[in-house]
Image (tube, rainbow, N blue to C red):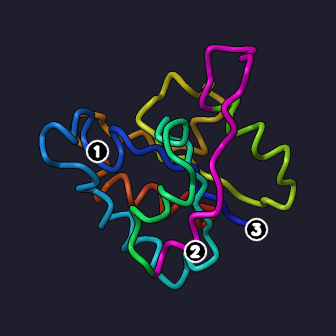
Amino acid sequence: MSTVLFLDFDGVLHPVGGAAAGTRLSQLPLLADLLREPAMADVQVVIASTWREMYPVTRLRKLFPADLQPRIVDATPVLDDYVTDHERYEEIRAWLDEHPETVRWAALDDDREGFPPKAHRNAVFPDATIGATPTDIDALRNLLAGG
């Protein structure tokens, strides 16, 4: 596994509160189109969303188009203790420590505070009230391609 995308759901795949507004997973087609690009064929997805605390990866995988489901490979761990206030990043680091074969990683997450400033270069932070936009997907493409 060389390239990994750590994916949040709320505020990314739909605006925060999207389920109530009927927009649940409304931005997923943008991400799906990116993942289908030939240059992104080796990108694996690890769920970093709090949804992983409620549902197993097997169920979360089914939210994605059938052709992409095999690429939803895991979820970040839920840690017992956090050393910093950057909880999302600590979960990602814990996963990366268990997967040293990862060469490149990026995060698509609306929680800027969940990452220390040094990790911002690996992340794209959509506006939580909108979710991921084409501009965010372009920025993510550049990160995943090593740009």
- Residue 9 falls inside the magenta stretch: no
The Cα–Cα distance between marks 1 and 2, rounded to whole angstroms, is 24 Å
Q: Pointer 2: what residue?
A: 70
Q: Seen in the image, is 139 located left or right of residue 25? A: right
Task: Identify which residue is drawn at 44% across, 55% down.
Answer: 139
Looking at the picture, how far across and down is residue 117, in whole percent?
A: 61, 26
Looking at the picture, how far across and down is residue 125, in whole percent?
A: 42, 39
Q: What SS does tag 1 mark?
A: loop
Give the class, few, some or many, for how many residues have Cα within 10 Å of label 1's Cα (few <14, many ≥20). many
Task: Identify which residue is drawn at 28% across, 54% down.
Answer: 25
Mark sitting earlier along the chain (3/1): 3
On screen, residue 39 above or below 28: below
Looking at the picture, how far across and down is residue 56, in whole percent?
A: 56, 50
The residue segment tinted magenta is: 67-88
Q: Seen in the image, is 101 located left or right of residue 66? A: right
Q: Which mark is residue 131?
A: 1
- Residue 76 falls inside the magenta stretch: yes
Name the mark nearer the viewer: 1 or 2.
2
Q: What SS does tag 2 mark?
A: helix
Q: Seen in the image, is 132 located left or right of residue 67? A: left
Mark sitting earlier along the chain (2/3): 3
Q: How many labels does the image show?
A: 3
Check disc 3 and give the amino acid type: Met
Check disc 2 and give the amino acid type: Pro
Q: Pointer 3: what residue?
A: 1
